[in-house]
Amino acid sequence: MEYGTLGTLRPRRVLPISALAVAIGVFAACGAAALLKLISFFTDLFFYQRFSTTPLSPAGHHLGALVPPAFPILSSHTMHVAPTPSWA
């Protein structure tokens, strides 16, 4: 019995591959949620000096107007200073 061209899947393989895709999606969603909690934690720590994971905007901080634009600039400079691996 033919199931189609070379690129089509056999019906008995569809369910295991679909289950694997669902498992990968669940792990990716959990990882994304953990990263959001880390971003919230470090935003609260650096802008408000408290240990919390509640998501807050850094807009109401007391550090000055030039602090939020300084983070991307400083992080880009640290990337240029970082050592290049030997295999690159």
Image (cartoon, helix red, strand yellow):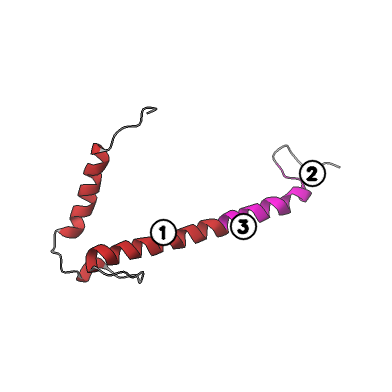
* The C terminus, quarter of image: top left
Majority secondary structure in the magenta region: helix
The residue positioned 33% from the left and 70% from the top of the image is: 52
Amino acid type assigned to the residue bearing label 3 in the image: Val
Amino acid type assigned to the residue bearing label 1 in the image: Leu
Q: In whole angstroms, how far apart are the C-alphas of marks 2 and 3?
A: 25 Å
The residue positioned 37% from the left and 61% from the top of the image is: 38
The residue positioned 22% from the left and 53% from the top of the image is: 71
Q: Indicate the position of residue 85 as horizontal and vertical percent values.
A: 35, 31
* Mark 1 surroundings within 10 Å by alpha-carbon count, few (fewer than 14), some (14 through 19), many (20 or more): few
Closest to the observer: 45 or 17?
A: 45
Q: Indicate the position of residue 48 as horizontal and vertical percent values.
A: 23, 69
Closest to the observer: 32 or 45?
A: 45
Residue position marked by numbered label 3 in the rendering: 22
Per the rendered image, the range of residues in magenta is: 8-25
* Residue furthest right as drawn: 1
Residue position marked by numbered label 2 in the rendering: 3
Q: In whole angstroms, how far apart are the C-alphas of marks 2 and 1?
A: 43 Å
Q: Which mark is residue 35?
A: 1
Closest to the observer: 76 or 42?
A: 42
Determine the secondary structure under disc 2. loop
Kindly check if marks 2 and 1 are in contact, taking CB atoms under 8 A apart as contact: no
Amino acid type assigned to the residue bearing label 2 in the image: Tyr
Determine the secondary structure under disc 3. helix
* Mark found first going from the N terminus, 2 or 1: 2
Q: Is residue 15 left or right of residue 60?
A: right
Q: In whole angstroms, how far apart are the C-alphas of marks 1 and 3?
A: 20 Å
* Mark 2 surroundings within 10 Å by alpha-carbon count, few (fewer than 14), some (14 through 19), many (20 or more): few
